[in-house]
């Protein structure tokens, strides 16, 4: 059976490269039709953006979300995450020849 996956890792990587946002790989808990299912996910972090708040930017799978990071982490049930700078993400992508996830703790499923 073919497992459908999203584009979060490549989209988040490209945004990190083009805009300098931090790249985040995380384990999230699904909502809606996938409620309660844990999966690997990638998104971007803009630290101390507007109003001195850290913001999550998620443009994966056709989304265009910008939400305070604390709210995003709570809604997504995110307790395990790894943040990469632009340089760290580039190094990992070149070494592994993929967009992630790279941390074994996050290698569950891909979104």
Image (spheres, helix red, strand yellow):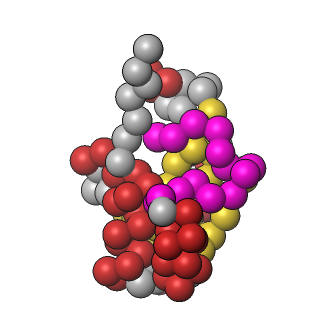
Q: Nearer the viewer, residue 15 or 70?
A: 15
Instruction: Report which quarter residue 67 is drawn in.
Output: bottom left
Magenta segment, prevailing SS (helix, strand or loop): loop
Residue 90, placed above or below residue 68: below
Location of the N terminus by quadrant is top left
Residue drawn at x 34%, y 60% as measured from the top left: 11
Q: How many marks?
A: 0
Q: Is residue 71 magenta?
A: no
Residue 8: tell me if it is visible.
Answer: yes
**Residue 41 in the image, given as x and y percentages of width and height:** 52, 48
Residue 25, placed above or below residue 29: below
Q: Give, as a single range, the part of the protein colored magenta.
A: 98-111
Q: Is residue 77 left or right of residue 69?
A: right
Q: Nearer the viewer, residue 99 or 7?
A: 99
**Residue 54 in the image, given as x and y percentages of width and height:** 54, 75
Q: Nearer the viewer, residue 104 or 73?
A: 104
Q: Nearer the viewer, residue 91 or 65?
A: 91
Residue drawn at x 69%, y 57% as measured from the top left: 103
Instruction: Report which quarter residue 25 is drawn in.
Output: bottom right
Residue 72: tell me if it is visible.
Answer: no
**Residue 17 in the image, given as x and y percentages of width and height:** 38, 79
């Amino acid at each position: 059976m073919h497992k459908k996956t999203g584009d979060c890792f490549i989209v988040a990587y490209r945004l990190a490269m083009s805009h300098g946002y931090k790249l985040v790989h995380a384990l999230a808990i699904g909502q809606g039709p996938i409620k309660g299912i844990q999966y690997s996910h990638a998104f971007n972090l803009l630290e101390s953006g507007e109003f001195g708040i850290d913001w999550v930017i998620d443009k994966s799978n056709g989304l265009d979300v910008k939400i305070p990071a604390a709210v995003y982490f709570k809604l997504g049930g995110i307790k395990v995450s790894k943040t990469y700078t632009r340089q760290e993400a580039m190094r990992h992508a070149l070494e592994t020849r993929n967009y992630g996830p790279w941390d074994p703790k996050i290698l569950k499923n891909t979104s």
